[in-house]
Image: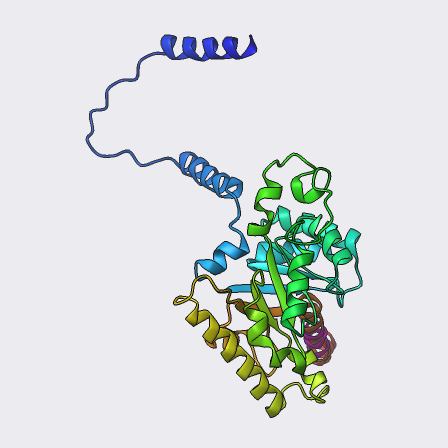
Amino acid sequence: MATSTAAATSLSYHLLAPKPKPRTSLLPRKPSRAASAISASAAAASDFLAPVPSLKSRLASGDTLYGLFLLSFSPTLAEIAGLAGYDYVVVDMEHGPGGIPEALACLRALDAARTPAVLRLPEACPVWAKKALDLGPAGLMLPAVESPAAAAEAVSCCRYPPRGVRGAAYPIVRASAYGLDDSYVSRCEDDTLIICQVETAAGVAEVEAIAAVEGVDVVQMGPLDLSASMGYLWDPGNRKVRATLREAEKKVLEARKKKGAAPETNAAFLGGFAMPNDPPEQLKLRGYNMVAGAVDIGLFRKAALENVKRFREASMEIGEEDDEEDEKEDGYWSE
Protein backbone atom coordinates (compact mmCIF):
# COMPACT_ATOMS: atom_id res chain seq x y z
CA MET A 1 0.00 0.00 0.00
CA ALA A 2 2.84 2.38 0.86
CA THR A 3 4.41 1.76 -2.54
CA SER A 4 1.14 2.49 -4.36
CA THR A 5 0.64 5.72 -2.39
CA ALA A 6 4.18 6.86 -3.17
CA ALA A 7 3.70 6.09 -6.86
CA ALA A 8 0.39 7.95 -6.94
CA THR A 9 1.89 10.96 -5.17
CA SER A 10 4.74 11.02 -7.63
CA LEU A 11 2.40 10.70 -10.62
CA SER A 12 0.14 13.49 -9.27
CA TYR A 13 3.12 15.74 -8.90
CA HIS A 14 4.11 15.32 -12.54
CA LEU A 15 0.53 15.77 -13.79
CA LEU A 16 -0.17 18.92 -11.75
CA ALA A 17 3.21 20.58 -12.04
CA PRO A 18 3.30 23.64 -14.31
CA LYS A 19 4.61 22.92 -17.77
CA PRO A 20 8.08 24.34 -18.43
CA LYS A 21 8.32 27.19 -20.90
CA PRO A 22 9.87 26.27 -24.24
CA ARG A 23 13.53 27.25 -24.60
CA THR A 24 14.26 29.85 -27.20
CA SER A 25 18.03 29.37 -27.32
CA LEU A 26 19.52 26.58 -29.40
CA LEU A 27 22.77 26.66 -27.39
CA PRO A 28 23.20 23.82 -24.89
CA ARG A 29 22.70 24.92 -21.32
CA LYS A 30 25.80 24.63 -19.14
CA PRO A 31 25.14 22.29 -16.23
CA SER A 32 25.10 23.95 -12.83
CA ARG A 33 27.78 23.24 -10.26
CA ALA A 34 25.23 21.41 -8.15
CA ALA A 35 24.20 19.21 -11.07
CA SER A 36 27.83 18.46 -11.88
CA ALA A 37 28.54 17.59 -8.26
CA ILE A 38 25.52 15.27 -8.11
CA SER A 39 26.61 13.62 -11.36
CA ALA A 40 30.15 13.10 -10.02
CA SER A 41 28.80 11.71 -6.75
CA ALA A 42 26.52 9.31 -8.62
CA ALA A 43 29.46 8.11 -10.74
CA ALA A 44 31.58 7.62 -7.63
CA ALA A 45 28.77 5.71 -5.93
CA SER A 46 28.38 3.54 -9.00
CA ASP A 47 32.12 2.74 -8.96
CA PHE A 48 31.95 1.95 -5.25
CA LEU A 49 29.03 -0.44 -5.69
CA ALA A 50 30.58 -2.21 -8.68
CA PRO A 51 32.23 -5.55 -7.83
CA VAL A 52 36.00 -5.42 -7.35
CA PRO A 53 37.76 -7.53 -10.03
CA SER A 54 39.48 -10.58 -8.58
CA LEU A 55 43.28 -10.72 -8.52
CA LYS A 56 43.13 -13.82 -10.72
CA SER A 57 41.09 -12.04 -13.38
CA ARG A 58 43.42 -9.03 -13.34
CA LEU A 59 46.49 -11.22 -13.76
CA ALA A 60 44.80 -13.10 -16.60
CA SER A 61 44.07 -9.78 -18.33
CA GLY A 62 47.75 -8.83 -18.22
CA ASP A 63 47.81 -6.37 -15.32
CA THR A 64 50.98 -5.98 -13.25
CA LEU A 65 49.86 -5.78 -9.62
CA TYR A 66 51.62 -3.72 -6.96
CA GLY A 67 51.19 -4.64 -3.32
CA LEU A 68 52.14 -3.93 0.27
CA PHE A 69 52.97 -6.28 3.14
CA LEU A 70 51.16 -5.53 6.39
CA LEU A 71 53.14 -6.74 9.42
CA SER A 72 51.72 -4.34 12.01
CA PHE A 73 48.22 -5.85 11.85
CA SER A 74 46.87 -2.31 12.17
CA PRO A 75 43.40 -2.01 10.57
CA THR A 76 44.03 1.72 10.22
CA LEU A 77 47.22 1.21 8.23
CA ALA A 78 45.49 -1.50 6.21
CA GLU A 79 42.71 0.92 5.28
CA ILE A 80 45.20 3.68 4.42
CA ALA A 81 47.12 1.26 2.20
CA GLY A 82 43.93 0.40 0.34
CA LEU A 83 42.94 4.03 -0.07
CA ALA A 84 46.47 4.88 -1.24
CA GLY A 85 45.91 2.68 -4.29
CA TYR A 86 47.82 -0.57 -3.72
CA ASP A 87 46.36 -3.35 -5.85
CA TYR A 88 46.53 -5.81 -2.96
CA VAL A 89 47.72 -6.05 0.64
CA VAL A 90 49.34 -9.13 2.16
CA VAL A 91 48.42 -9.58 5.82
CA ASP A 92 51.50 -11.41 7.09
CA MET A 93 50.71 -14.07 9.68
CA GLU A 94 54.10 -15.72 9.10
CA HIS A 95 56.27 -12.90 10.45
CA GLY A 96 53.72 -10.46 11.86
CA PRO A 97 52.52 -10.68 15.49
CA GLY A 98 48.86 -11.31 14.71
CA GLY A 99 46.72 -14.37 14.20
CA ILE A 100 43.25 -15.06 12.85
CA PRO A 101 41.31 -12.50 14.99
CA GLU A 102 43.76 -9.71 14.13
CA ALA A 103 43.76 -10.67 10.46
CA LEU A 104 39.96 -10.50 10.41
CA ALA A 105 40.02 -6.87 11.55
CA CYS A 106 42.47 -6.03 8.76
CA LEU A 107 40.33 -7.82 6.17
CA ARG A 108 37.33 -5.76 7.21
CA ALA A 109 39.34 -2.56 6.86
CA LEU A 110 40.59 -3.59 3.43
CA ASP A 111 37.08 -4.52 2.33
CA ALA A 112 35.98 -1.02 3.31
CA ALA A 113 38.74 0.35 1.08
CA ARG A 114 37.76 -2.10 -1.70
CA THR A 115 41.24 -3.63 -1.76
CA PRO A 116 41.87 -7.39 -2.10
CA ALA A 117 43.61 -9.02 0.85
CA VAL A 118 46.02 -11.93 0.68
CA LEU A 119 46.77 -13.85 3.88
CA ARG A 120 50.29 -15.23 4.27
CA LEU A 121 50.13 -18.33 6.45
CA PRO A 122 52.63 -19.23 9.17
CA GLU A 123 52.79 -22.72 7.70
CA ALA A 124 51.48 -24.49 4.62
CA CYS A 125 49.06 -26.86 6.34
CA PRO A 126 45.33 -27.69 6.24
CA VAL A 127 44.53 -26.18 9.66
CA TRP A 128 45.91 -22.70 8.91
CA ALA A 129 44.55 -22.72 5.35
CA LYS A 130 41.05 -23.70 6.54
CA LYS A 131 40.87 -20.97 9.17
CA ALA A 132 42.28 -18.33 6.83
CA LEU A 133 40.04 -19.18 3.88
CA ASP A 134 36.93 -19.06 6.08
CA LEU A 135 37.65 -15.35 6.63
CA GLY A 136 37.14 -14.70 2.90
CA PRO A 137 40.47 -13.33 1.62
CA ALA A 138 41.20 -12.86 -2.08
CA GLY A 139 44.07 -15.31 -1.82
CA LEU A 140 46.50 -17.29 0.31
CA MET A 141 50.29 -17.24 0.30
CA LEU A 142 51.84 -20.50 1.49
CA PRO A 143 55.49 -20.39 2.62
CA ALA A 144 58.51 -22.59 1.92
CA VAL A 145 57.19 -24.74 -0.93
CA GLU A 146 60.16 -26.83 -2.10
CA SER A 147 58.73 -29.48 -4.44
CA PRO A 148 55.85 -30.22 -6.83
CA ALA A 149 54.42 -32.59 -4.21
CA ALA A 150 54.45 -29.82 -1.59
CA ALA A 151 52.80 -27.47 -4.09
CA ALA A 152 50.05 -30.02 -4.79
CA GLU A 153 49.46 -30.37 -1.04
CA ALA A 154 49.22 -26.59 -0.71
CA VAL A 155 46.57 -26.48 -3.44
CA SER A 156 44.70 -29.35 -1.79
CA CYS A 157 44.52 -27.35 1.46
CA CYS A 158 42.59 -24.66 -0.42
CA ARG A 159 39.98 -26.91 -2.02
CA TYR A 160 36.93 -28.72 -0.74
CA PRO A 161 36.65 -32.52 -1.18
CA PRO A 162 36.88 -34.40 -3.42
CA ARG A 163 39.50 -32.08 -4.99
CA GLY A 164 41.11 -31.21 -1.67
CA VAL A 165 41.04 -31.49 2.10
CA ARG A 166 39.59 -28.14 3.18
CA GLY A 167 37.11 -28.50 6.01
CA ALA A 168 33.56 -27.47 5.14
CA ALA A 169 31.78 -24.87 7.25
CA TYR A 170 30.61 -22.67 4.37
CA PRO A 171 27.04 -22.13 5.64
CA ILE A 172 28.27 -20.09 8.63
CA VAL A 173 31.63 -18.47 7.80
CA ARG A 174 32.47 -14.95 6.67
CA ALA A 175 33.74 -16.13 3.27
CA SER A 176 30.16 -17.01 2.24
CA ALA A 177 28.68 -13.90 3.88
CA TYR A 178 27.74 -16.18 6.79
CA GLY A 179 25.72 -18.41 4.49
CA LEU A 180 23.91 -15.62 2.63
CA ASP A 181 25.99 -16.09 -0.53
CA ASP A 182 24.65 -19.25 -2.18
CA SER A 183 27.21 -19.04 -4.99
CA TYR A 184 30.29 -19.21 -2.76
CA VAL A 185 30.98 -22.95 -3.00
CA SER A 186 30.63 -22.99 -6.78
CA ARG A 187 32.99 -20.06 -7.38
CA CYS A 188 35.50 -20.00 -4.51
CA GLU A 189 38.12 -22.07 -6.33
CA ASP A 190 37.92 -19.84 -9.38
CA ASP A 191 38.21 -16.66 -7.30
CA THR A 192 40.85 -17.58 -4.71
CA LEU A 193 44.44 -16.88 -5.68
CA ILE A 194 46.91 -19.56 -4.53
CA ILE A 195 50.47 -18.29 -4.14
CA CYS A 196 53.34 -20.70 -3.42
CA GLN A 197 56.51 -19.20 -2.04
CA VAL A 198 59.76 -20.53 -3.46
CA GLU A 199 62.42 -19.26 -1.10
CA THR A 200 65.12 -21.90 -0.68
CA ALA A 201 67.82 -23.37 -2.88
CA ALA A 202 65.88 -26.66 -2.89
CA GLY A 203 62.74 -24.87 -4.03
CA VAL A 204 64.54 -22.97 -6.78
CA ALA A 205 65.87 -26.27 -8.14
CA GLU A 206 62.23 -27.39 -8.58
CA VAL A 207 60.70 -24.03 -9.51
CA GLU A 208 59.71 -25.01 -13.05
CA ALA A 209 57.88 -28.12 -11.84
CA ILE A 210 56.24 -26.19 -8.99
CA ALA A 211 54.94 -23.56 -11.42
CA ALA A 212 53.43 -26.35 -13.55
CA VAL A 213 51.34 -27.85 -10.72
CA GLU A 214 47.63 -27.44 -11.46
CA GLY A 215 46.08 -24.88 -9.13
CA VAL A 216 49.25 -22.92 -8.39
CA ASP A 217 48.43 -19.42 -9.60
CA VAL A 218 51.59 -17.55 -8.59
CA VAL A 219 55.14 -18.55 -7.71
CA GLN A 220 56.41 -15.98 -5.23
CA MET A 221 60.19 -15.69 -5.07
CA GLY A 222 61.66 -15.09 -1.60
CA PRO A 223 65.10 -13.46 -1.96
CA LEU A 224 65.87 -13.05 1.74
CA ASP A 225 65.21 -16.66 2.74
CA LEU A 226 66.90 -17.78 -0.46
CA SER A 227 70.07 -15.92 0.50
CA ALA A 228 69.94 -17.54 3.96
CA SER A 229 69.54 -21.03 2.50
CA MET A 230 72.56 -20.39 0.28
CA GLY A 231 74.73 -19.29 3.21
CA TYR A 232 74.47 -15.53 2.62
CA LEU A 233 72.08 -14.48 5.38
CA TRP A 234 73.79 -11.10 5.85
CA ASP A 235 74.38 -10.57 2.13
CA PRO A 236 71.07 -10.94 0.23
CA GLY A 237 72.50 -8.94 -2.66
CA ASN A 238 75.34 -11.40 -3.17
CA ARG A 239 76.20 -12.06 -6.80
CA LYS A 240 75.48 -15.80 -6.46
CA VAL A 241 72.09 -15.16 -4.87
CA ARG A 242 71.15 -12.71 -7.62
CA ALA A 243 72.24 -15.15 -10.33
CA THR A 244 70.18 -17.96 -8.77
CA LEU A 245 67.15 -15.69 -8.49
CA ARG A 246 67.45 -14.57 -12.13
CA GLU A 247 67.64 -18.18 -13.31
CA ALA A 248 64.47 -19.06 -11.38
CA GLU A 249 62.67 -15.99 -12.76
CA LYS A 250 63.65 -16.97 -16.29
CA LYS A 251 62.20 -20.48 -15.92
CA VAL A 252 58.83 -19.24 -14.62
CA LEU A 253 58.54 -16.52 -17.28
CA GLU A 254 59.49 -18.88 -20.10
CA ALA A 255 56.87 -21.37 -18.95
CA ARG A 256 54.28 -18.57 -19.13
CA LYS A 257 55.30 -17.83 -22.72
CA LYS A 258 54.99 -21.48 -23.70
CA LYS A 259 51.51 -21.76 -22.23
CA GLY A 260 50.04 -20.23 -25.39
CA ALA A 261 51.10 -23.32 -27.32
CA ALA A 262 49.84 -25.68 -24.60
CA PRO A 263 46.86 -23.99 -22.89
CA GLU A 264 45.88 -27.17 -21.05
CA THR A 265 49.07 -27.03 -18.95
CA ASN A 266 49.47 -24.87 -15.86
CA ALA A 267 52.01 -22.06 -15.87
CA ALA A 268 52.04 -19.89 -12.77
CA PHE A 269 52.52 -16.14 -12.77
CA LEU A 270 55.66 -14.68 -11.21
CA GLY A 271 55.56 -12.75 -7.95
CA GLY A 272 58.34 -11.21 -5.89
CA PHE A 273 59.54 -8.98 -3.09
CA ALA A 274 61.45 -5.79 -3.71
CA MET A 275 64.75 -5.42 -1.87
CA PRO A 276 67.09 -2.46 -1.29
CA ASN A 277 69.39 -3.87 -3.97
CA ASP A 278 66.45 -4.79 -6.23
CA PRO A 279 63.74 -2.08 -6.22
CA PRO A 280 60.15 -2.75 -7.35
CA GLU A 281 60.61 -0.89 -10.64
CA GLN A 282 63.32 -3.38 -11.64
CA LEU A 283 61.08 -6.35 -10.87
CA LYS A 284 58.38 -4.85 -13.05
CA LEU A 285 60.83 -4.33 -15.91
CA ARG A 286 62.01 -7.95 -15.65
CA GLY A 287 58.45 -9.19 -16.17
CA TYR A 288 57.13 -9.88 -12.67
CA ASN A 289 53.33 -10.06 -12.59
CA MET A 290 52.95 -9.30 -8.87
CA VAL A 291 55.38 -7.01 -7.06
CA ALA A 292 55.36 -6.48 -3.29
CA GLY A 293 57.19 -3.19 -3.10
CA ALA A 294 56.92 -2.14 0.54
CA VAL A 295 56.25 -3.20 4.13
CA ASP A 296 54.11 -1.02 6.38
CA ILE A 297 56.61 -1.14 9.24
CA GLY A 298 59.46 -0.23 6.90
CA LEU A 299 57.52 2.72 5.50
CA PHE A 300 56.70 3.99 8.98
CA ARG A 301 60.27 3.49 10.21
CA LYS A 302 61.67 5.47 7.30
CA ALA A 303 59.12 8.27 7.69
CA ALA A 304 59.69 8.42 11.46
CA LEU A 305 63.48 8.64 11.14
CA GLU A 306 63.24 11.33 8.48
CA ASN A 307 60.71 13.25 10.57
CA VAL A 308 62.95 13.23 13.66
CA LYS A 309 66.00 14.15 11.58
CA ARG A 310 64.21 17.15 10.05
CA PHE A 311 63.14 18.34 13.49
CA ARG A 312 66.63 17.98 15.01
CA GLU A 313 68.22 19.84 12.13
CA ALA A 314 65.53 22.51 12.14
CA SER A 315 65.79 23.02 15.90
CA MET A 316 69.52 23.74 15.57
CA GLU A 317 68.86 26.30 12.86
CA ILE A 318 66.05 27.87 14.85
CA GLY A 319 68.31 28.11 17.88
CA GLU A 320 70.97 29.87 15.87
CA GLU A 321 68.42 32.29 14.42
CA ASP A 322 67.02 33.02 17.89
CA ASP A 323 70.48 33.97 19.12
CA GLU A 324 70.88 36.44 16.28
CA GLU A 325 67.42 37.91 16.91
CA ASP A 326 68.21 38.26 20.62
CA GLU A 327 71.31 40.28 19.78
CA LYS A 328 69.33 42.56 17.46
CA GLU A 329 66.59 43.01 20.04
CA ASP A 330 69.11 43.81 22.77
CA GLY A 331 70.67 46.39 20.50
CA TYR A 332 67.28 47.92 19.72
CA TRP A 333 66.23 48.24 23.33
CA SER A 334 69.60 49.64 24.35
CA GLU A 335 69.23 52.60 22.01
In the displayed structure, 136 sits above or below 21; it is below
Inspect this view and state whether residue 328 appears: no
Q: Residue at x 65, y 50 (%)?
A: 162
Magenta: main secondary structure? helix
Q: Nearer the viewer, residue 23 or 247?
A: 247
Q: Nearer the viewer, residue 21 or 90?
A: 90
Instruction: Please state the horizontal and vertical placement of residue 13, each as a whole percent of the image.
Output: 42, 11
Inspect the magenta stretch and tell me whether residue 307 lies in it: yes
Inspect the magenta stretch and tell me whether residue 73 lies in it: no
In the displayed structure, 145 sits above or below 89; it is below
Q: Residue at x 68, y 36 (%)?
A: 179
Number of callouts in the render? Answer: 0
Magenta stretch in the rendered image: 305-313
Q: Residue furthest front?
A: 162
Instruction: Please state the horizontal and vertical placement of residue 177, each as a whole percent of the image.
Output: 66, 39
> On the image, which quarter does residue 31 sit in?
top left
Instruction: Please state the horizontal and vertical placement of residue 180, each as a whole percent of the image.
Output: 65, 34
Q: Is residue 121 left or right of residue 19?
A: right
> On the image, which quarter does residue 262 sit in?
bottom left
